[in-house]
Image (spheres, grey):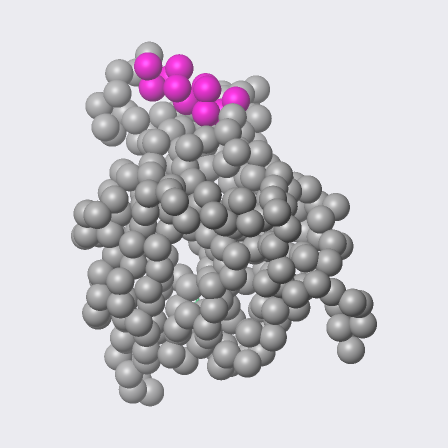
Amino acid sequence: MNLSDRLQLPSYLHHTDDVKRRVEELRNRAVVLEVDGLGRKFDSAKGEVTALHDINLEVRSREFVSVIGPSGCGKSTFIKILAGLDTPSSGAARIDGTPIDGPGAERGMVFQGYTLFPWLSVKRNVMFGMRMKGVKRKSAEQQALEWLEVVGLEKFADHYPAQLSGGMKQRVAIARALANEPRILLMDEPFGALDAQTRAAMQSHLLRVWEKVDVTVLFITHDLDEAVYLSDRIVVLGAHPGRILEVIDVPVDRPRDPEQFLTGHFLATKRRLEELIHSGGHGDQDEAA
Ligand code: ADP
Ligand code: MG
């Protein structure tokens, strides 16, 4: 029996007035991402694999949505389709009503292994997308410095990626993605390679940035604490076939603070995630996360 089983917890469905207000307010916002009957099958040596089955989801303006599930449940396949790097076998996804068909500047990507250009300075990495779009050098430079200030790295503008820690590199990657003013930020386990302490700092940092910037976030993780701490809603996927088990409105007040990790509502949500993940089909390595 783990700690949360022994504690008297509120129901994860119980919402404080603050949470009720936020959930209600979010429901009235414009839909940015619409996913409609999305499916993806792969042919493999062992036969056909249904990586995703009938995924339906709407993500609204400035909402922070996480997708969680065991290894092999289709998380990366899902975000690759949204990024335009893979094509669904059925259904469709739209941004502001326009079907996704290949990569686009309105979707910013921060992936775990999505590295910076090592031969460009931090500033030039952030300027890169703007320069590609034809923004004049002076203006791109000015904006890059502003984005670096947002992620707290303005002092490192002239450094090169090799001179930065892992956490700092991911902050540059976030600044680079935001500099293109995307409608949605697609993040696939962006902190997965960082040590626990840096990872915790990056989570709080991302929340502070998200509070300042008008952007919607779709965040993939297999870390339960990370999902609860960051999100407005959590989409829980099961494996084989990859499908939605439940979508949870996170009943934790905002603004978030690491002290909330031990509150009843936080622990109750984590317990519900654990239940769903244990019941929802096993992942590729039976990894219960
Ligand atoms: P996750 O990111 O949740 O770990 P993935 O989206 O990477 O899961 O994979 C979902 C399932 O689809 C897995 O069973 C995986 O083996 C399979 N899969 C993913 N990509 C391919 C591919 N290119 N060809 C064949 N099978 C694939
Ligand atoms: Mg993955």
Specify the quadrant that holds the N terminus: bottom right
Q: Is residue 111 visible?
A: no
Q: Position of residue 94 (x, y in %)?
A: 24, 52
48 lies left or right of 177:
left
Q: Does the magenta stretch mainly form a helix, a strand or a loop?
A: helix
Residue at 33% x, 31% y: name it: 180
Quarter holding residue 227: bottom right
Judge by depth and name the residue closer to the eye, 196 or 74: 74
Is residue 187 found inside the magenta-colored segment of the image? Answer: no
Quarter holding residue 36: bottom left
Residue at 60% x, 75% y: name it: 275
Is residue 142 found inside the magenta-colored segment of the image? Answer: yes
Q: Position of residue 205 (x, y in %)?
A: 59, 37
Judge by depth and name the residue closer to the eye, 231 or 221: 231
Total numbered labels placed on residues in the image: 0
Q: Is residue 4 visible?
A: yes
Q: Position of residue 92 (x, y in %)?
A: 22, 61
Residue at 50% x, 29% y: name it: 212
Q: Which residues are magenta?
A: 139-149
Judge by depth and name the residue closer to the eye, 167 or 249: 249
101 lies left or right of 176:
left
Judge by depth and name the residue closer to the eye, 180 or 163: 180
From this view, report whether residue 134 is shown above or below residue 92. above
From this view, report whether residue 268 is shown above or below residue 24. below
Q: Position of residue 130 (x, y in %)?
A: 30, 26
From this view, report whether residue 37 is shown above or below residue 157. below
Residue at 46% x, 20% y: name it: 146
Residue placed farthest to the top in the image? 138
45 lies left or right of 217:
left
Residue placed farthest to the front in the image? 17
